[in-house]
Amino acid sequence: MKEVAINQKYKDSVFRMLFNNKKELLSLYNAVNGTTYENVDDLEINTLDDGVFMKMKNDISFVLGFELNLYEHQSTKCGNIALRFLLYVSDLLSGMVVRDDLYKSKVIHIPAPRFIVFYNGHEITEDRVLYKLSDQYEKKLSAPELELTATLININEDHNPELMNACRTLKDYSIFVGRIRKYAKTMILEEAVKSAVAECIAEGILADFLAKNRAEVIRVSVLEYNEELHLKNVYQDGYDDCAAQKDAIILEKDAIIAEKDNALAKKDLALAELNDRISKLEALLADLTSKDN
């Protein structure tokens, strides 16, 4: 296998700033899997340089124990998680193997892929959610031949306490984000972030990290929060457009039904008039016939 090149083309999210560190990433892996790995040299980070979501780089991929782990952080709901992971892992594996070897008889062994999303938005309230690629198939299959399962883990405060307690950095990150959101309700965003940073440092929450990277964390947090709001607005705009289309369709349908009812009423009236004329003619004919007799 060949090593994948990494660069900093996009700005890292705070999540990646924290866990792009091998020691912290190993702690996170152990917390997720209930393992006790200690040697950080056993972990190889191989994140792609273009595996990004908008302007922020919020993903980490690494190999450990014959597993290819793909971790992603999200603060907005997305129904295409499995499909995105499929495209991402395909690019990763393509970079790991020499294409000519694919046509040789010798089996190429690859690390087993695993997919995790760390979520701290507000739309999803469950502790964990499974996303399957087959759920996105237009045709449902009883035994899909291509499947990918991703696990979404809710890292908001008061969710997954065992996991959060097993990884102090993840728990502190959740608290830090919660503070930003709390202050952003009543303060200018940049001031909200500054207040959250100062408060967390004072309380020993990510204290060393925030003190060392204060300026960068503030810049990145403002960018992240604005991006989160943008994605929510895009979702809301799409929802509003859909709702408007539904309303227009309902109005048009109601108009057609009213027109149909009107036409039927007119038709019934016309039929009644014709039946009345027929009845009168039949009565007249019967009267004439009786006179003839």
Image (cartoon, helix red, strand yellow):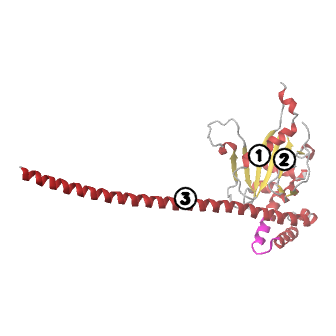
Q: Which percent across, then down, holds residue 182?
A: 76, 70
Using the rendered image of the protein, determine whether residue 40 is visible from the camera's viewpoint. Answer: yes
Which x, y percent locates residue 225?
79, 64
Q: Residue at x 85, y 51 (%)?
A: 27
Report the Cα–Cα distance between label 1 and label 2: 11 Å
Q: Quadrant of residue 133?
A: top right
- Left/right placement of residue 128 relative to residue 277 reads right
Q: Which mark is residue 85?
A: 1
Observer able to see residue 66? no
Disc sitting over residue 286 in the figure: none
Specify the segment rendered in magenta.
Answer: 177-189
Q: Residue furthest bottom?
A: 186
Q: Quadrant of the N terminus?
A: top right
Q: Residue at x 83, y 35 (%)?
A: 110
Few, some or many C-alpha atoms within 10 Å of disc 1 (few <14, some 14-19, many ≥20)? many
Task: Say which residue label 2 marks.
Answer: 61
Q: Position of residue 74 (x, y in %)?
A: 76, 56
Q: Would you place residue 147 above or below residue 54 in this image? A: above
Quarter-of-image position of residue 57? bottom right
Residue type indicated by callout 3: Ile
| Type of amino acid at the residue the image marks with label 2 | Ser
Give the side of residue 211 with respect to residue 273, left or right: right
Give the Cα distance between marks 1 and 3. Answer: 36 Å
> Callout 2: 10 Å neighbours few (<14), some, many (20+)?
many
In depth, the one of 87 and 18 nearer the eye is 87
Q: Are the residues tagged 1 and 2 within 8 Å (C-beta)?
A: no
